[in-house]
Structures are given as C-alpha cells and as structure tokens.
Image (cartoon, grey):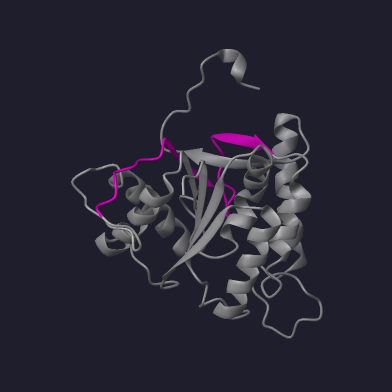
Amino acid sequence: MKLDLLAIGAHPDDVELSCAGTLAKEVAKGKKVGIIDLTRGELGTRGTAETRDQEAFDAAKILGVHSRINMRFADGFFKNDKAHQLELIKMIRYYRPEIVLCNAIDDRHIDHPKGSQLVSDACFLSGLKKIETHYDDETGAQEPWRPKAVYHYIQWKDIEPDFVVDVTGYMEKKKASVLAYKTQFFDPDSQEPETPISSKNFTDSVDYRARNLGRLIGVEHAEGYTVERYVAVNSIFDLK
C-alpha cells in the first residue's frame, strides 16, 4: 500500500495528541495517510493494552486514515538497534511514504526521543539497497525506499518548531480522536490513579497549545514540527 504520509508514534495516542490535525487535513485533501504505533502502551498506568488497542482503532476511524498497525515493540524497553530498525524498515518499504512524522526529538517520556531516533535511522537505512528485507506475505526482496522528509512533532516539552501547519477547521476532529482514549485522559468519575496526562489542564492543553501556535502565524490553530534538514521552497512567495 503506497501512502503519501505516515505518522509513527511510540505509543497509541502520541500521534493523536501531536499531529492529528495535520493528518485529518491531509485526509480531507485526498492524501493517503497511515499510522504506526511502535508499542501497545502496555506500561501505561491507566487502562490496559487491550483497551488501548480498541481506543487506537476508534481514533483511526475518527481521523479516517487508510491504515493503522502496531509493531508490538516492548513499551519502555524497545531499543534503537538492528533488530528493531529492520522491522521498521520492512514497514517503511511496504508503505513507501513520501513524508514521515515521528516523535519529538526530546521529551519527558524516554520512549519519545528513543522512538524519534529509531524512526529517523530506519528511514535512512530503508534507502540502502544492500539491506535486504522481506515483507511477510510477499515473495522476493523489498525494494529500497527512503521518504523525502522526516519531521518531528512536538509533545510534552515546548520545543520551538521549525515550521507550523495551519490546522484551522480540523481541531474538533483532532480532539475527538484524542478523547477516543477514554482510559487515558481526564474523567472526573474515573477510579484510576492520576497521571501527568489525566488532568483537565492537560486535556485543555491540546486546544490552547494549538491556539497559541495559530496565534503566532495569524490563524486559529496550528501544529508545530522540527526538521532534520533545511525546508526548501520554490519561491519566497510560498512562505506565509
């Protein structure tokens, strides 16, 4: 399956919290969009791996993405090593995305920067023809594929973005996809332990952080990204 855009997150809900507005906008424009979760979030304080599976399915349906898979790497303990890189390379070569969005380069949760580097390294290695991989249900070796760009979304920490995407008009869909993770976020009736992301302030931050980035570029809502190389434009007038 050829995708235009592939968003990858260490945990189910990373993508929704960070770049769901961008995904929803591109889906609406007719782009083929997919999501890969590296782990099932099985070490999360609230809920279970099984509830996260269902919540991820529900969120994907809300966003209208074309594909969502889970790599089932070990939450908290996956590594940026050859074994994990090769598994991810298989999926990059299978989906052949033009653009990959992935975890923040630095963040509170150790899986986020670790996942960020793993994805970045796998995207580079995926373009090397001497690395041979085979997808499960296909015969023959996969062809090499390297995405045109890898961009890192912003998570817990307020990292200064290199560019922002106007997601005005797509915040309701983004917030609905976030709230599909019923076990994870604010619920005044929940008997689960409190966590850094279960407060009302955190849920509210999904909107007010996007509003702040939007304010800075003169729109209602925006999502920010950091880059690995310079962003190029054909004309100075392409910049807004």
Quarter of the image with the C terminus is: top right
| Residue 93 appears in the rendering | yes
| Residue 80 appears in the rendering | no
Q: Name above or below for residue 108 compared with residue 127.
A: below
Of residues 195 and 137, the one drawn nearer to the viewer in this rendering: 137
Q: Main secondary structure of the magenta part?
A: loop
Residue appearing at x 62%, y 46% in the figure = 23
Rendered image quadrant of residue 198 = bottom right
Q: Position of residue 144 (x, y in %)?
A: 29, 43
Q: Position of residue 199 (x, y in %)?
A: 73, 69
Residue appearing at x 41%, y 44% in the figure = 96
Q: Name above or below for residue 98 compared with residue 35.
A: above
| Residue at the outermost right position | 188
Q: Is residue 187 left or right of residue 36?
A: right
Rendered image quadrant of residue 74 = bottom left
Q: Position of residue 101 (x, y in %)?
A: 50, 46
Chain part drawn in magenta: 140-166
Q: Name above or below for residue 39 compared with residue 14.
A: below
Rendered image quadrant of residue 111 = bottom left
User: Is 161 one of the magenta-colored residues?
Assistant: yes
Residue appearing at x 56%, y 65% in the figure = 12
Q: Position of residue 39 (x, y in %)?
A: 47, 68
Of residues 207 and 72, the one drawn nearer to the viewer in this rendering: 72
Q: Is residue 165 left or right of residue 191?
A: left
Residue appearing at x 51%, y 72% in the figure = 40
| Residue at the outermost front position | 139
